[in-house]
Amino acid sequence: MKPLSVSSIVILFAAATAVGAAVAVLLPTLMITAYTGLLFLGIAAVLFHFGRRVHALRKGEPRRISATGAMNVAMFAYSAAWVSAAAIGFFFGAVLAMLRNAHAEYVQTSMLGAILSALGAAALLVVAFVVERWCHLDDDEDAGSSGVEQGVS
């Protein structure tokens, strides 16, 4: 698996920004709450917890995670980065579209919710990048060996 590409994440962000702006224009009463941001923060905490296990496994410390589990954490981090980048773009586009009606109180509330949700998604994106790097195999490691062969279970 190739490591995450920043340029691909930026392209996804740009596309999701356009979608978010279009949705906010087509649905002017769109209400975004901060609960989405809390959901992203919860997912980031879970990902970081399992990422620490993989990091300890790579350092040789005994942990309760197998090589297959480490691969699952890597895929979780990879997909979380893509989803959080799309969510940040969507919320950013929605806030940009809502600026034209920023005088209305419900729009201000929705903009605040979108900003807080984007911050939660940004935290998930940072955690996903860090954990994905922890799960990446170094070039000097034997690509054919598994954790079971190295004595890790």
Image (tube, rainbow, N blue to C red):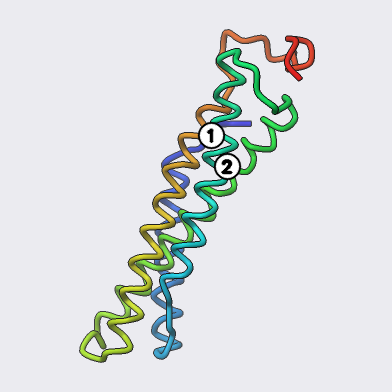
Residue 144 picture location, percent across and down: 74, 14
Residue 115 picture location, percent across and down: 33, 67
Residue 53 picture location, percent across and down: 59, 29
Q: Is residue 12 above or below residue 115?
A: above
The image quarter containing residue 1 is top right
Q: Which mark is residue 124?
A: none
Q: Is residue 23 above or below residue 1?
A: below
Please report the residue visible at 46 percent of the width from the left and 70 percent of the height from the top. 35
Callout 1: SS: helix
Q: Is residue 9 above or below residue 20?
A: above
Q: What residue is shown with label 1?
A: 132
Q: Amino acid at mark 2?
A: Tyr
Residue 56 picture location, percent across and down: 57, 22
Please report the residue visible at 60 percent of the width from the left and 15 percent of the height from the top. 61
Q: Amino acid at mark 1?
A: Glu
User: What residue occupies the far left of the structure in this picture?
Assistant: 103
Dots 1, 2 in contact, CB < 8 A: yes
Callout 2: SS: helix
Crowd class of label 1 (few under 14; some 14 to 19; many from 20; radius 10 Å): many
Q: What residue is shown with label 2?
A: 78
